[in-house]
């Protein structure tokens, strides 16, 4: 327990934790299951090109998400790029996408010759909404909307889709955060032309590396399958260009184990989230991002918003103080993509155009959750945050 400001590690005292507590971490399966799965791969000598584990995983994900087609991909970035091309959008067309998201949402568009048109997000949900896309719908060259379900909470789908349809725009989603989540009771994965999920190591469903496209559109699915590679397609169809989005048996083995553990991992995430919520309640100027209780969530991210005036310190100062204690809180997303290279140079017109996003970029942070974070760790982190807030003015003086 810290008794005085001099006890903070940033000012030279001992750290609260001996080793780093990260935000993004892998939910590892049991080592025994892992070895058994790899023995199977070795005995079959079938390592890639749509082996039995890949086929099983596609079928299980179809069932899990209630969607007709799953196309496994090397990773979500490749999945997004292939999906964007498969939609047949005009070369150089503009795709409305939020800036408050992981860079790959926009970068995948750039890779296939499309242009991101950065829009604002709703300051409450942090996600794209009908309101945030409305000013851009009639702009020249706009051909699609790429929605992002940030932190796993479904974006404003019910209002975005009809509005986009009125303007003849296709809608697809970066659903990298939203595996196993619902929107209005329906599982995410069933919306838009298609949705793209990530199974990167830090995502709740993990293949180590990996991703997939989900769609109910059989024709689009076949184009995407053919683009992924010549394997695993059901029928040969004409495609714009071949790619290599292949997924391996090793990835499928990891993902199948992760899918077996999915409910358990989400429950543990939820327990950690609820504990943070309980222990951080009442800290002035600190808001825990909340979810709609009627929807299913994966609780992979514990997101805080710092209001400097009420908390007494800003988000960056809090993150720095925690980092010194070995609490590796993150600042997703700083800077916004519109202010990052290459986009700030490619599209200077957006740099000052997104004040709501800029504001979020100064306030939002994530605290460690995931498999290695114990309840006792959360207790210590919460005590630290309380202590920092109570002593904010003295800390501020020492920092300046
Ligand atoms: C992780 C992530 C991606 C990229 O996924 P990869 O599988 O690593 O390519 C894309 N968008 C968002 C919002 C993400 O969080």
Image: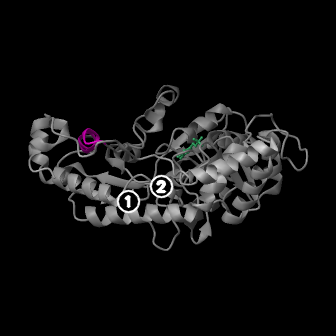
Tell me whether circle 1 and circle 2 mark residues in contact (CB < 8 Å): yes
| First-in-chain label (1 vs 2) | 2
As drawn, which residue projects farthest toward the bottom? 294
Give the residues drawn in magenta, as a range: 318-326
Question: Mark 1 to mark 2: distance in Å?
Answer: 9 Å
87 magenta-colored? no
Residue located at (83% from left, 46% from top): 232
Please give the label number shown on residue 375.
none
> According to the image, label 2 marks what residue?
151
Q: Secondary structure at mark 2?
A: helix
Residue 226 point in image, percent of width and height: 83, 42
Residue located at (26% from left, 61% from top): 280
Q: Quick check: can you spot residue 87?
A: no
Query: Is the residue at mark 1 in contact range of ligand 1, meaning its CB lies under 8 Å from it?
Result: no
Secondary structure mainly formed by the magenta segment: helix
Colouring method of the image: one colour
Residue 251 point in image, percent of width and height: 67, 45
Relative height, residue 364 to residue 160 (above, below) = above
């Amino acid at each position: 327990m810290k008794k005085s400001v001099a006890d903070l590690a940033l000012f030279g005292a001992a750290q609260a934790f001996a080793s780093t507590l990260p935000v993004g971490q892998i939910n590892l399966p049991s080592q025994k299951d892992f070895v058994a799965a790899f023995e199977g791969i070795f005995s079959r000598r079938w390592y890639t090109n749509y082996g039995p584990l890949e086929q099983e995983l596609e079928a299980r994900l179809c069932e899990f998400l209630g969607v007709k087609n799953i196309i496994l991909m090397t990773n979500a970035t490749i999945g997004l790029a292939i999906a964007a091309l498969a939609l047949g959008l005009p070369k150089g067309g503009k795709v409305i996408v939020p800036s408050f998201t992981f860079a790959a949402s926009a970068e995948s568009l750039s890779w296939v010759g499309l242009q991101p048109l950065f829009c604002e997000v709703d300051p409450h949900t942090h996600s794209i909404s009908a309101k945030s896309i409305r000013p851009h719908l009639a702009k020249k060259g706009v051909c699609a909307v790429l929605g992002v379900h940030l932190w796993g909470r479904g974006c404003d789908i019910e209002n975005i889709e009809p509005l986009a349809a009125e303007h003849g725009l296709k809608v697809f989603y970066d659903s990298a955060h939203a595996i196993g989540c619902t929107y209005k009771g329906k599982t995410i994965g069933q919306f838009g032309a298609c949705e793209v999920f990530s199974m990167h190591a830090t995502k709740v469903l993990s293949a180590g590396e990996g991703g997939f496209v989900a769609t109910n559109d059989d024709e689009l699915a076949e184009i995407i399958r053919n683009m992924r590679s010549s394997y695993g397609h059901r029928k040969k169809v004409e495609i714009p260009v071949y790619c290599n989005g292949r997924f391996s048996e090793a990835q499928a083995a990891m993902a199948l184990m992760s899918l077996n553990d999915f409910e358990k991992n989400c429950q543990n995430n939820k327990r950690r989230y609820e504990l943070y919520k309980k222990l951080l309640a009442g800290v002035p100027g600190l808001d825990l991002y909340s979810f709609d209780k009627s929807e299913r969530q994966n609780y992979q991210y514990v997101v805080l918003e710092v209001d400097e005036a009420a908390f007494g310190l800003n988000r960056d100062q809090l993150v720095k103080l925690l980092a010194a204690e070995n609490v590796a809180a993150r600042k997703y997303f700083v800077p916004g993509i519109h202010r990052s290279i290459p986009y700030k140079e490619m599209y200077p017109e957006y740099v000052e155009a997104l004040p709501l996003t800029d504001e979020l970029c100064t306030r939002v942070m994530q605290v460690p959750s995931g498999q290695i974070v114990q309840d006792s760790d959360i207790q210590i982190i919460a005590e630290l945050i309380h202590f920092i807030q109570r002593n904010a003015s003295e800390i501020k003086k020492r920092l300046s």
